[in-house]
Image (cartoon, rainbow, N blue to C red):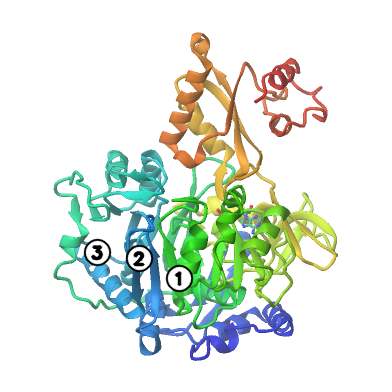
């Protein structure tokens, strides 16, 4: 990007430059990141680049600096890119007109929304929850919060009312932004109604701002709910950006861990900004005229960092899609790519696998000539999907970047840089500059050398690292920083190949990755246990052709349920999960059992349940320590 001020230190263009940048980032991280951060718009520069105590989970980047991220996403570009497209919105229905917003227009819309928030009493530091469809107003709303220093917490618009209420209450949000309804493929969902139900148990919420999208009549709760379009009628198109401290929180995003309720991952302003921008430019090797499309929903971290913040910080054109890959048919992604001349395409393995299952003509009938780089994120991409993507979508012309990272890391940690560093099927590849991955033994000893496997941890702080878990710093420490002192623990297992490229094997904790969405087994079990028929449950993952992992639930029912039809009980359990979490957490298989394999100390032996779910019953290992080994035979017998 020739005329962008951040180009000089921020853009790697050869393998040599990568190695050089990597070396410098390890030898002198503070100088390295100071150079990368230099060209952003700062109200005041930092006094210290990094202040970190990994063991305490304390990481402060660009200490003392003052800025507003939206000045860097928007205002900064107005001089040279005012008429460049910032967002292209492609609606769910291909027959509906798409919409384009230039940087100037987006700036104005964000300022208007920010003024509406101000007029509704939102102030710096307030938490605002956003539950909206993938429409431009979602992007605008997020940026509007950042403009006035409110902390946004986007909740994926597929979560249930109960899940929304949990998040709204945990974040102590006072304002919720939503829409009347949303389109998802052939379905329409009354989003506002879901919010209304959620807010019955959220006494702290005093204002709901509703965006009109489907034109549906909705119930407006008097004194609490207002229409965005009415509020926006006379507001100014400019709004001064609030000056924020580098470490002021920018957003909270809820994600699942191995225990208990989802936790609010907190990212702060300056470090996240520098990290999102740096990784975006380098991984995708962005050029000025690229049309970039990330298919993730803004409700997930990928949408935050690589649909919204990363692209806008870099002054790119970002496409936003309301629909799903298979509506109206399995050619929709490819049609959109041709229609908008998309040059960089970033999606998830689960989407690729679902499209692979459709006849090949769905992809072959589109030219896809505009494509230059392909990306994958969210879960391990299997070899078959990698090759299908590379051959049929990228026509063996486009490098595939398999990007490994997490909600907690803020941005991409290990990945090829397109066309620069090696791209090997099923391998994420080399670490980003600034990222020092290590493989640990279970006891926490670093494993040296290549061709090795272990627990993946990160040795040194990086600008996008999680700052805390909202309202409970100790939880962040216990989850990420205490397991191995001095390291950030990822929860993933990985292998380093003979050339030092990393391959992510999968989670080593009780986290399940279904279609790239994270769930804790405990979280799903808690939901199942709410069902009136259920005494106890145990949830494990099993390999699933499209979703990567499927959910297998073993359930013990109350004696009173014995007379009920099993299919009826299963349907009722599914209903409970959908109500507690959402459709995305629906188990693929439910097996009603009379007992669970437990040790004498009462611990469920998940290893056995996992093997049965995987169909590996010939190799169950030692079952003699079980309290009641006969239970295993029953489970095998009744397996689904
Ligand atoms: O297990 C890894 C898997 O997804 C987890 C992070 O999930 P989440 O925080 O929801 O973020 C998803 C989007 C960044 C990781 O711990 N994961 C993510 N990307 C990859 C991956 N596994 C293998 N390869 C990837 N590229």
Mark 3 vs mark 1, CA separation in Å? 33 Å
The answer to whether residue 406 of the structure is visible from this angle is: no
The answer to whether residue 539 of the structure is visible from this angle is: yes
- Identify the image quadrant of the C terminus: top right
Residue at 29%, 43% (x, y): give it. 199
Q: Quadrant of residue 127?
A: bottom left
Q: Is residue 155 above or below residue 424?
A: above
In the picture, the disc for residue 117 is 3
Q: Is residue 10 above or below residue 530?
A: below
Residue at 69%, 68% (x, y): give it. 396
Q: From the image, state whether disc 3 or disc 1 is nearer to you.
A: 1
The earlier-in-sequence mark between 2 and 1 is 2
The earlier-in-sequence mark between 3 and 1 is 3
Q: Considering the numbered disc 3 on the image, is that residue within a helix, a strand or a loop?
A: helix
Mark 2 vs mark 1, CA separation in Å? 10 Å
From the top left corner, tell me how far across and down residue 208 is, in percent.
24, 52
Circle 1 sits on which residue? 340
Mark 1 burial class by Cα count in 10 Å: few <14, some 14-19, many 20+: some
Circle 2 sits on which residue? 98
Residue at 65%, 55% (x, y): give it. 490
Q: Considering the numbered disc 2 on the image, is that residue within a helix, a strand or a loop?
A: loop
The earlier-in-sequence mark between 3 and 2 is 2
Ligand 1 neighbours mark 3 (CB distance < 8 Å): no
Label 2 close to label 1 by CB (< 8 Å): yes
């Amino acid at each position: 990007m020739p005329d962008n001020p951040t180009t000089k230190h921020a853009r790697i263009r050869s393998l040599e430059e990568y190695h050089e940048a990597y070396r410098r980032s390890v030898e002198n991280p503070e100088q390295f990141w100071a150079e990368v951060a230099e060209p952003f718009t700062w109200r005041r520069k930092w006094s210290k680049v990094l202040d970190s105590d990994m063991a305490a989970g304390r990481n402060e980047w660009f200490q003392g600096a003052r800025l507003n991220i939206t000045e860097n996403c928007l205002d900064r570009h107005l001089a040279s890119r005012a008429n460049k497209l910032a967002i292209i919105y492609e609606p769910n229905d291909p027959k509906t007109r798409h919409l384009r917003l230039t940087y100037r227009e987006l700036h104005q819309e964000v300022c208007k929304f920010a003024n509406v928030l101000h007029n509704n009493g939102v102030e710096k530091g307030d938490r605002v929850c956003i539950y909206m469809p993938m429409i431009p107003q979602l992007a605008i709303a997020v940026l509007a919060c950042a403009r006035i220093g409110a902390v946004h917490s986007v909740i994926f618009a597929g979560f249930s009312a109960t899940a929304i209420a949990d998040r709204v209450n945990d974040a102590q949000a006072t304002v919720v932004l939503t829409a009347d309804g949303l389109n998802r493929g052939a379905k329409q969902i009354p989003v506002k109604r879901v919010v209304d139900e959620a807010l019955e148990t959220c006494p702290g919420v005093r204002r709901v701002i509703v965006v009109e999208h489907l034109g549906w009549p909705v119930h407006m709760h008097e004194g609490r709910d207002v229409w965005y379009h009415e509020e926006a009628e006379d507001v100014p198109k400019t709004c001064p950006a609030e000056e924020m401290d580098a470490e002021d929180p920018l957003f909270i995003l809820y994600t699942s861990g191995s225990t208990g309720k989802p936790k609010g991952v907190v990212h702060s302003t300056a470090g996240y900004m520098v990290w999102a921008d740096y990784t975006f430019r380098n991984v995708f090797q962005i050029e000025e005229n690229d049309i970039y499309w990330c298919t993730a929903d803004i409700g997930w971290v990928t949408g935050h960092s690589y649909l919204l913040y990363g692209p806008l910080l870099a002054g790119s054109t970002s496409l936003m899609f309301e629909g799903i890959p298979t509506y109206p048919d399995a050619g929709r992604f490819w049609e959109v790519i041709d229609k908008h001349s998309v040059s960089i395409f970033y999606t998830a393995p689960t989407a690729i696998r679902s499209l692979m299952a459709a006849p090949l003509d769905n992809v072959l009938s589109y030219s896809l000539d505009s494509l230059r780089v392909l990306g994958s994120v969210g879960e391990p991409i299997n070899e078959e999907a990698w090759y299908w993507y590379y051959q049929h979508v990228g026509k063996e012309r486009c490098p595939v970047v398999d990007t490994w990272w997490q909600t907690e890391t803020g941005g991409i940690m290990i990945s090829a840089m397109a066309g620069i560093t090696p791209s090997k099927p099923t391998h994420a590849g080399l670490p980003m500059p600034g990222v020092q991955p290590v493989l640990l033994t279970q006891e926490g000893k670093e494993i040296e050398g290549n061709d090795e496997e272990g627990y993946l941890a990160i040795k040194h702080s990086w600008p996008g690292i999680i700052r805390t878990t909202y309202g409970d710093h100790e939880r962040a420490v216990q989850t990420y920083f205490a397991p191995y002192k001095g390291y950030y623990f990822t929860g993933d297992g990985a292998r380093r190949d003979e050339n030092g490229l990393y391959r992510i094997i999968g989670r080593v904790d009780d986290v399940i990755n279904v279609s790239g969405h994270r769930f804790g087994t405990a979280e799903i079990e808690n939901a199942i246990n709410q069902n009136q028929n259920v005494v106890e449950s145990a949830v494990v993952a099993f390999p699933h052709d499209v979703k990567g992992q499927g959910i297998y639930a073993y359930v013990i029912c109350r004696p009173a349920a014995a007379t009920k039809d099993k299919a009826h009980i299963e349907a009722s359990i599914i209903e409970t999960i959908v109500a507690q979490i959402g459709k995305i957490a629906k188990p693929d298989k439910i097996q009603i059992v009379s007992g669970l394999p437990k040790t004498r100390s009462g611990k469920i032996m998940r290893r056995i349940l996992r093997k049965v779910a995987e169909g590996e019953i010939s190799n169950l290992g030692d079952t003699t320590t079980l309290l009641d080994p006969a239970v295993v035979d029953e489970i095998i017998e009744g397996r689904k």
